[in-house]
Amino acid sequence: MNALVFIEYKDNKIKKSSLECLSAVKGDSHTIQTCAIGAGSDQLTAALGAWGVTKHYSCTDVDTYNPELYKNFVAKVIEQTKPDVIVATSNNVGRDIFPRVAAQFSMAYMSDITEVEMDSDLEVKRPLYAGKCTAQVTFTDDSGKILLLRPNQISVVEASESVTTENIAIAAGAPSGQSETLSVEKGESEKLDLTEAETIVSGGRGLKEAENFKLLHDLAAPLNATVGASRAVVDLGWVPHSLQVGQTGKTVAPSLYFAIGISGAIQHLAGMSGSKNVVAINKDEKAPIFQKSTYGLVGDLFEIVPVLTEKLKSL
């Protein structure tokens, strides 16, 4: 199978979500090619060689996000590589670009995939109804397919090959003028993206008002953590959607997850169930979050969090 993987990176380091995409297609019978766009996209070949990538297509002449230019670049790569399957991350960028690509090439498209089987017939699984059930899908024709994988669902396998990856530069070209990117603003999660973070401090309605999220930022600072939130407070407008953890937000799998003032609705649990250690702070001892927590503190978060913050600062 000829697979094309869309690579996302930061500071010349491949993001964990893209490593998961590479893991999904890695196999003796698969040819892996990759593509990436942006400054430094041509500097990834050494890392990609360990994954058995034979060719890497890069575009360095785009410095501002524009979905049309991204789509144009991917389209040019597809015309050269003619992949059987294209794999990318199911995030805001992936869901913005690849439906356009699918429409242009009449490819089958599926997002939010949590499991992939490529050894025989291509088969994938994705959750439905806020994770209450799972759809198992088999592709029946031989046309190209686009698969967007939900972050933190596919295990990253060991990269142990020593292939020399050829870098091929491609220009994105000019936008068609159908849309224009006016500005790109950085989200409030100023540390690491939630899907990449090793430590996350999340808050819910128990914080009572938006201003009290400062407690979480204060706690996150000594932990070098990223701040997240439940859907309830996002719906209330306390924080932007980019901070939402859950079925309709971001799926995370940090080493340490703080759930502060979060009751533990199924929608939220679906997004953080992969966390290795969960610390829950809630005054309701019957809150569902305690059933999923490694450590639970029953009490007033407004008393507990400041003390915990000061203890961490003193370490």
Image (cartoon, rainbow, N blue to C red):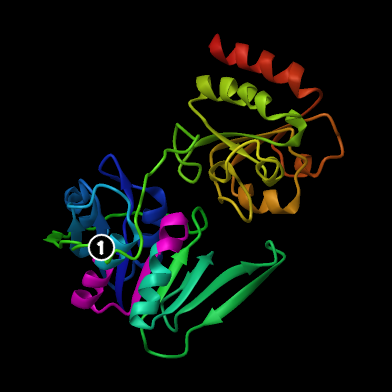
- Residue designated by label 1: 175
**x, y percent for residue 160:** 27, 55
Residue at 47 percent across and 84 percent down: it is: 139
Looking at the picture, how far across and down is residue 96, in whole percent? 43, 62
Q: Is residue 298 left or right of residue 224?
A: right
Q: Nearer the viewer, residue 96 or 292?
A: 96
Tell me: residue 48, above or below residue 231: below
The residue most toward the top is: 314
Is residue 190 a member of the stretch shown in magenta? no
Residue 91 included in the magenta stretch of the image: yes
Q: Quadrant of residue 144?
A: bottom left
**Residue, x 42% and y 82% (percent of image)?**
120
Amino acid type shown at disc 1: Pro
- The answer to whether residue 157 is visible is no
Q: Residue at x 20, y 62 (%)?
A: 174
Q: Which residues are magenta?
A: 73-96
- In the picture, the quarter occupied by the N terminus is bottom left
Q: Badge 1: how crowded within 10 Å, few (<14), some, or many (20+)?
A: some
Question: Mark 1 falls on what kind of element?
Answer: loop
- Expressed as whole percent of the image width and height from the top left, the position of residue 170 reads 15, 63
Q: Residue at x 76, y 42 (%)?
A: 289
